[in-house]
Amino acid sequence: MNLIYIFADQWRRDVLGIYDSRVKTPNLDAFAEESAVFDRAYSSCPLCSPNRACLLTGKQPRNTNVFTNCKPGVDAYLPEDTICVSDVLKAQGYHTGYIGKWHLDKPDGDDPNNWDAYTMPGKRRHGFDFWYSYGAHNRHSHPYYWTTEGEYVEVDEWSPKHETDVALQFLKENKDNKFALFISYNPPHTPYDQTPEKYQNLYTGEEKDIKAVTPAPEGAGDKLGANWNQKENVKGYYGAVSGIDENIGRIISYLKENDHYEDTYIFISADHGDMLGDHGRFAKHIWYEGSVGIPLIIGGGDIKPMRTDTLVGGPDQTAAILGLLGLPIPESMQAKDFSPLLRGESFEEYESIMTVSFPNTKERIEEFQAHGKNFMDYGWRSIITKEYKLAILKGMSYGEKPQTFLFDLKNDPYENVNIHDDDVMQRMMRELKKWCDATGDGFLDDLFSACHHNDLNS
Ligand SMILES: [Ca+2]
């Protein structure tokens, strides 16, 4: 069996035709009809590099060494000696390829505006033979890449279209080989106005009516600025998703026309979502569904159509890739292989999953260190069950007072009401403790003493 793993950057789950008929994604809707659709897949750390690291390593976000985006001033990068899913695929004889955004290496130089990095051939490419990639840039209309040999290439074309052309060439060249190809599209990530007109013109900008209205707390997520244009941004964002749909459609058509659909597993997903105006926020890095909820559709091969509300985190996708292909899952991976579910076998689901975020700038990290604190024990943690979501914002900066949020997802899917229910809270706190224990997270100890201290003084 072969593998194609396609993920788009900053693509929230509900901007997809199967969830909202105002979104035009005919190819993905048709693919979903014959595939396994996961309605509750989540980003484990809703930022670019951290969730990408979870996907490649199968580790929980605390343990990947990629606690925030790879950017100047912080020591976040994917270590050479970590075993990635691609290292396993390569060792098992797959012809491997990576196309598009990588964003897992230290930037070249210390210009705060340059987050890009050249990933040199060898161990840093973690088993990928074919390479057509860059670190991080948002030049959707004029992208550039480094090739397998390290040659620099600039292109005047919308990046998903160009990357799909490259992917189809890879598939043609490997038609008689066992292959595993990862395609990492940058749109619908900002800037939204680089989406080609033909896709933007499919929309009026009225498609997203904001129902998630309660403002997010200060100090979390990215606040909407004065120049935020909801209508124009929706046109660009939804248009980009329609463009992604068209290009994924080209890949699926190729596989079907060339007798490769039956022997290839196809994953469609994202690294995290985009708040797109919900709760007064844009982008990600916050616990609400718009930020952490991602699409996940798995089809091709012998996958039977199904719809499931099984909770899936970033690293679990990694384990399921290996599980589906019948390959060994390295002990370093901290994930649940849900491939038995896809085979119709018995499967013990997670009761909850945890999504996390850590302090993310040099200044904030140094402040925690100056007070003798491990910054990795701060930020926020969120526990998600099928019915509820708990989020605790302990503080992205030193000295903040912790804030707790509890949402009833069944009755309040837009997370507008912070409920008070002692029984639910106790259950959720037990789940949080389980996850902290399992991942070596010191988030709770210090939090309890902080809360106790506040109680005494209130
Ligand atoms: Ca991203």
Image: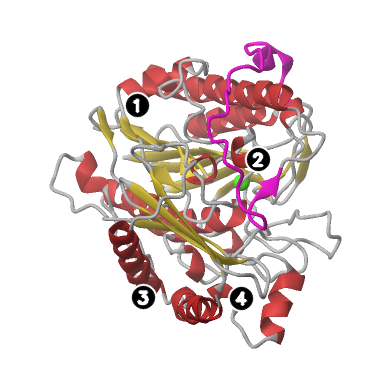
Give me the C-alpha separation between circle 4 and circle 3: 17 Å
Which residue is at 68% across, 17% downward? 200
SS type, badge 4? helix
> Which residue, given by chain and number where applicable, does mark 2 sit on?
280
Q: Quadrant of the N terminus?
A: top left
- Mark nearer the N terminus (4 vs 1): 1
Q: Earlier in the sequence, mark 2 or mark 3?
A: 2
Asked whether disc 2 touches disc 3, contact meaning CB atoms under 8 Å apart, the reply is no
Residue at image location 72% in from the left, 19% down from the top: 196
Q: Amino acid at mark 3?
A: Asp
Mark nearer the viewer, 1 or 3: 3
Please report whichever mark, 2 or 4, sits nearer to the chain's N-terminal start. Answer: 2
- What range of the chain is rendered magenta? 194-223
Identified by mark 1, the residue type is Tyr
CA–CA distance between discs 1 and 3? 42 Å
How far across and how far down the image is residue 426, in percent?
A: 31, 65
* SS assignment for the magenta stretch, majority: loop
Task: Name which of mark 4 and mark 3 comes first in the sequence.
Answer: 4
Q: Which residue is mark 4?
A: 375
